[in-house]
């Protein structure tokens, strides 16, 4: 069965998350329904990251096995035609070797968290940013973020419902910069993240931006390994999965047929 790699963009606002669930429409279900519409099959797609309800993506990656060979551009265009009424877009499709796995072959995942920092609430970007009306000190946020970079036990910064057996992760990057207009951008990169880890980071770094926490406070919360020591968990609205990177071996492609 030929395997295809899909790169996907979506507005997570209307969905219960990436993964198919019983309690609402998911991004996975939207795409699988579209695939069924033009292939006549009932394929299952596998995503690189199981984004939560309300979380967006500009670079989600998934793979799917189909029963027959299709031109990669046909997969992209036909699938987009079948899901055109949904805020989901297949940016690209490519034939990929069958040792590629969107989730388990991933080497790095990058996320962006957007904070809209002004007194007046957003109108155009409502539901796509976290509105924080109090002025934030971006430099203080970035300095505090550096206490979290590296390999740590991140039990403080994960959901109480997190199913990961091991809370140890290696955070390669956590940066806070002034974004365009009145935005503050938090970027994070690691091979994998815990449930609610980035939203926990964002809520904690907001406290640093307001002058209520210092880098030492963030470091102490990390070392406590105590979920109750975390700052408030930021809403899903501002979180985006932006990029998934793969090693050379699993990424080799096959020519279209």
Image (tube, rainbow, N blue to C red):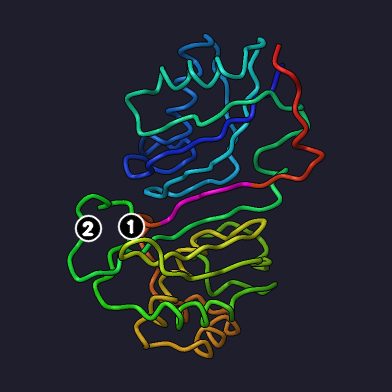
Which of 219 and 110 lies nearest the eye of the viewer? 110
| Residue interval drawn in magenta | 239-244
User: What residue is shown with label 2?
Assistant: 122
Quadrant (top left/top right/bottom left/bottom right) for the N terminus: top right
Position of residue 105 relative to residue 134, above or below, is above
- Residue 67 screen position, x and y as percent: 65, 12
Secondary structure under tag 2 reads: loop
Which of 195 and 126 lies nearest the eye of the viewer? 126
Chief secondary structure of the magenta portion: strand
* 147 relative to 229 in the view: left or right: right
Residue at x 47%, y 81% (from the top left corner): 229
Q: Is residue 238 magenta?
A: no
User: What residue is shown with label 1?
Assistant: 129
Q: Are marks 2 and 1 in contact (CB under 8 Å)?
A: yes
Residue at x 53%, y 43% (from the top left corner): 59
- Residue 113 screen position, x and y as percent: 44, 60
Q: Earlier in the sequence, mark 2 or mark 1?
A: 2
């Amino acid at each position: 069965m030929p395997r295809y790699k899909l790169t996907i963009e979506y507005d997570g606002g209307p969905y219960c998350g990436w993964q198919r669930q019983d309690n609402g429409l998911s991004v996975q279900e939207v795409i699988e329904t579209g695939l069924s519409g033009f292939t006549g099959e009932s394929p299952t797609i596998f995503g690189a990251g199981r984004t939560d309800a309300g979380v967006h993506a500009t670079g989600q990656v998934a793979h799917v096995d189909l029963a027959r060979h299709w031109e990669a551009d046909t997969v992209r265009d036909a699938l987009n035609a079948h899901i055109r009424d949904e805020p989901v877009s297949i940016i690209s499709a490519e034939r990929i070797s069958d040792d590629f796995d969107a989730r388990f072959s991933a080497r790095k995942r990058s996320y962006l968290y957007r904070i809209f920092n002004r007194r007046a609430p957003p109108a155009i970007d409502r539901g796509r940013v976290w509105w924080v009306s109090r002025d934030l000190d971006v430099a203080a946020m970035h300095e505090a973020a550096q206490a979290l970079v590296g390999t740590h036990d991140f039990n403080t910064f994960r959901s109480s419902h997190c199913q990961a057996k091991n809370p140890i992760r290696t955070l390669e990057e956590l940066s806070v910069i002034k974004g365009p207009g009145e935005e503050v951008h938090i970027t994070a990169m690691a091979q994998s993240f815990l449930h609610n880890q980035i939203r926990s980071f964002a809520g904690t770094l907001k406290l640093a931006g307001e002058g209520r926490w210092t880098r030492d406070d963030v470091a102490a919360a990390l070392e406590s390994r105590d979920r109750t020591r975390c700052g408030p968990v930021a809403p899903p609205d501002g979180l985006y999965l932006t990029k998934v990177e793969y090693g050379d071996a699993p990424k080799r492609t096959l020519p279209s047929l």
